[in-house]
Image (tube, rainbow, N blue to C red):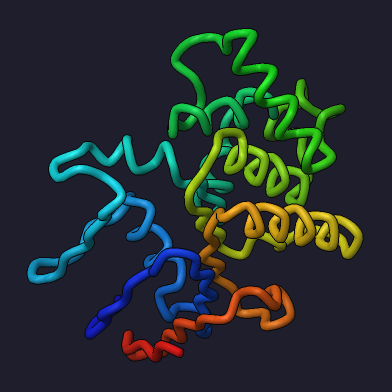
Amino acid sequence: VIRSLDWALQHGQHWSVTGPNGSGKSTFIALLYGDLWPAHGGRIERPLLPAGAPIEDWKRIVGLVSPELQATYATTACTVEEIVVSGLHSSIGLNAPATPGERALADRALARVGMLELRGRRSRELSYGQLRLALLARAIVAPRRLLLLDEPFDGLDAATCTAVRRMLGRLASARVQLVLATHHGEDVPGYVRHVLALGRSGLATVT
């Protein structure tokens, strides 16, 4: 899907990943997160972790929002609170009930995205935009070094988009790095100054 790519995320950088549908934006985000692995001959390095560290250690410091994750949660009976708490474990759903401390962290994250009053609602009862906000809360429920955001504003109304952009701006100011995949140029904040453009052929342009 993606070939001939030599790319590095340097300290302090924020990137947008652009390209038409089918160009590999979601594949690239999944590769960065660790849900996909490079084909034979390719490699990915994560220097923030010691050599041989499990991918779960990486996922603890990286938040993810993606259409694939949303589609998975849309078929579950998880509550909004359970969705957010699962971000502490990089899991789909929970293997055990949330602790009081975990619930407090979830409430804080939900309040930041304006979803606190819906914490008991089931995923199947949410609108597309509400579920996207729940996933954003899941992504920020723990301290993160990096946020991987695949079309994070899809399904959000204008006022909610503005609020989410402000929240992401505050996180960026606090040295959380962002990689934002989108085919809407207006979704890219001004502080995101680096662009990885993917083409239909699988080739990439870096600026």
Q: Residue placed farthest to the left in the image? A: 41
Percent across and percent down for residue 53 are 20, 38
Q: Image point 55% across, 38% down: which residue?
A: 143
Does 79 appear above or below 188? above
Percent across and percent down for residue 76 are 57, 31
Left/right of residue 58 with respect to residue 124 in the rendered view: left
**Looking at this view, is 182 or 206 the one in front?**
206
Does 29 appear above or below 71? below
**Looking at this view, is 75 or 153 the one in front?**
153
Q: How many marks?
A: 0
Question: Which quarter of the figure has residue 182?
Answer: bottom right
Q: Image point 51% across, 81% down: which residue?
A: 194
**Looking at this view, is 10 or 5 the one in front?**
10
Left/right of residue 189 with respect to residue 19 in the rendered view: right
Does 186 appear above or below 158? below
Q: Image point 84% across, 40% down: which residue?
A: 114
Q: Image point 63% across, 59% down: which residue?
A: 172
Percent across and percent down for residue 96 are 48, 10
Percent across and percent down for residue 175 are 57, 55
Left/right of residue 62 with respect to residue 132 in the rendered view: left
Question: Which quarter of the figure has residue 57?
Answer: top left
* Quarter of the figure that contains the N terminus: bottom left
Left/right of residue 113 with respect to residue 51 in the rendered view: right
